[in-house]
Image: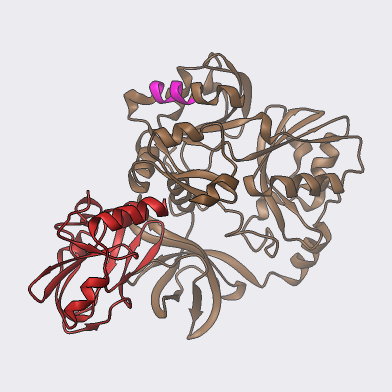
Chain colours: A red, B brown
């Protein structure tokens, strides 16, 4: 369920790092909890985001939820497809529905994040 | 969820778990908020039929020669004017005119009224009615004796008809009949909280699981879906039906909530009447009104509403409307400024976003 090549936060974001670039998304658990997603608010390219701080929000029919930056860095690219089709977040949260790509400013921050197995345990416990 | 142990559950709780429903704490009850998804469930009710477990709702029975007098003294609508087999929407008020609860009153017999009340208010309602019972009437808290299912949608009547010998087409809107459903005794009411056609049935808790399955089977040819409280909320909001704790509560009067039609001031004395008479004379200060978002965002419950850059009211409910494909909501505004077509600003996470007040209900089914 939770890909091994991603790292996870307790706030239910994931990051896939290649070199010093990281793609960020929200987890399958998060999209299930939220239900039908209707809006995604994301930072513009050029924005500096800081690990553990709010960088945007996801809104479903039922509720709105903050997105926290899993690591610090500069936003390079935003997944524009989500503005038109936010439901992609319900359909493919770990793939097509990535939110932003950032250039990591402190790659060692990754070490603080959860592995797939740890995240799975964490949401198991949360349930 | 360790706290789940303390939550109350309906007899259908194991069914919801087996269906993979997402369960939430709803006023102390562990209830399904969704099964397949709120939008899909919402559309099932608007286009075909949906099945809701609403067994958390409370029931109060009032019996005795003066049962009607007690109901009329504690509820705002005129219960003694109901025919036997007829139901109506009504309000229980505090002496100061705010809501204890909003309820459905069914007249079973001249000496027997059956009240359907909100789940989390049932103990409070029971105590409230008893406190004003100076009549020859018995008040009986009956929530444990009934499970309740709502079969809602244009195919709701056809679905339920397969399971009962009662001719459903003979039960007019807001009337009810006692009969059987799938062989079990049932009170079959032509009522609902979705703005769609359909029925609500009161059945023995021990039969709830079996009847649920029978209804699902009967509705299969129409594409029936189990529906949770999430869809129930978006459906009732489109139909502008009040939800206790949102549009109405102890601080809100029926006039402010636009529920003048359930208040019968000339039926004789009732709890809250004096306060309402005074309010009628002096005029209400605030009024419930519908809005549609103009800007991007959803004005949700509790968000502040600004008029001309000054705080003027608050949102009671807000959501995307799956039927209209717009973001809609209800809010309180100063009564003298609550007219249709006014631009308002709703503060959505520190950002003022434009909305416009509109006619309600947002959705009305074609008859």
Residue B73, compared with residue A86, is above or below; it is above
Residue B214 lies in the magenta stretch: yes
The spot of residue B167 in percent (x, y) is 54, 17
Residue at point 48% right, 17% down? B163
Q: Nearer the viewer, residue B127 or B172?
A: B127
Magenta: predominant secondary structure element?
helix
Residue B350, compared with residue B193, is above or below; it is below
The spot of residue B344 in percent (x, y) is 45, 75
Q: Which residues are magenta?
A: B212-218
| Quadrant position of residue B200 | top right
Tell me the quadrant of the picture where the C terminus of chain B can be found: top left
Q: Nearer the viewer, residue A49 or B61?
A: A49
Is residue A70 visible in the rendered structure shown here? yes
Residue at point 47% right, 23% down? B160
Residue B201 lies in the magenta stretch: no
Is residue A35 visible in the rendered structure shown here? no
The spot of residue B128 in percent (x, y) is 80, 49
Residue at point 26% right, 54% down? A117
């Amino acid at each position: 369920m939770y890909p091994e090549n991603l790292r996870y936060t307790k706030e239910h974001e994931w990051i896939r790092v290649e070199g010093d670039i990281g793609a960020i998304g929200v987890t399958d658990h998060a999209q299930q909890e939220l239900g039908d997603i209707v809006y995604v608010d994301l930072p513009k390219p050029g924005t500096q985001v800081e690990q553990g701080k709010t960088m945007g929000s996801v809104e479903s029919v039922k509720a709105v939820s903050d997105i926290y930056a899993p690591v610090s860095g500069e936003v390079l690219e935003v997944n524009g497809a989500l503005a038109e089709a936010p439901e992609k977040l319900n359909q493919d949260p770990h793939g097509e529905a990535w939110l932003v790509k950032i250039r990591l400013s402190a790659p060692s921050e990754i070490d603080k994040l959860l592995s797939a197995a740890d995240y799975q345990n964490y949401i198991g416990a949360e349930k | 969820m360790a706290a789940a142990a303390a939550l109350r559950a309906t007899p259908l709780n194991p069914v919801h778990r087996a269906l993979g429903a997402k369960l939430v704490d709803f006023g102390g009850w562990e209830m399904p908020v969704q099964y397949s998804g709120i939008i899909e469930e919402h559309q099932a009710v608007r286009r075909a039929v949906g099945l809701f477990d609403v067994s958390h709702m409370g029931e109060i029975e009032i019996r005795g020669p003066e049962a009607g007098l007690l109901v009329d003294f504690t509820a705002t609508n005129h219960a003694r004017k109901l025919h036997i087999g007829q139901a109506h929407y009504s309000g229980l008020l505090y002496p100061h005119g705010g809501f204890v609860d909003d309820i459905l009153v069914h007249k079973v017999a001249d000496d027997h009224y059956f009240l359907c009340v909100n789940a989390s208010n049932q103990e409070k309602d029971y105590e409230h009615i008893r406190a004003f019972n100076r009549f020859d009437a018995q008040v009986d808290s009956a929530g444990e004796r009934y499970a309740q299912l709502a079969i809602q949608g244009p195919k709701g009547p056809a679905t339920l008809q397969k399971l009962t010998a009662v001719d459903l087409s003979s039960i007019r809107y807001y009337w009810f009949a006692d009969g059987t459903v799938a062989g079990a005794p049932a009170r079959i009411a032509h009522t609902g909280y979705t703005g769609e056609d359909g029925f609500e049935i009161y059945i023995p808790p021990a039969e709830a699981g079996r009847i649920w399955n029978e209804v699902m089977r009967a509705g299969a040819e129409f594409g029936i879906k189990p529906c949770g409280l999430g869809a129930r909320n978006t459906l009732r909001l489109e139909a502008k039906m009040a939800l206790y704790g949102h549009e109405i509560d102890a601080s809100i009067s029926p006039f402010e909530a636009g529920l003048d039609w359930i208040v019968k001031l000339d039926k004789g004395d009732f709890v809250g009447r004096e306060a309402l008479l005074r309010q009628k004379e002096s005029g209400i200060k605030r009024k419930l009104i519908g809005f549609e978002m103009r800007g991007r965002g959803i004005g949700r419950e509790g968000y502040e509403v600004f008029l001309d850059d000054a705080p003027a009211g608050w949102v009671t409910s807000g959501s995307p409307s799956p039927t209209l494909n717009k973001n809609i909501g209800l809010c309180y505004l100063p009564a003298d400024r609550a007219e249709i077509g006014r631009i308002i600003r709703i503060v959505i996470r520190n950002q003022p976003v434009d909305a416009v007040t509109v006619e309600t209900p947002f959705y009305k089914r074609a008859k």
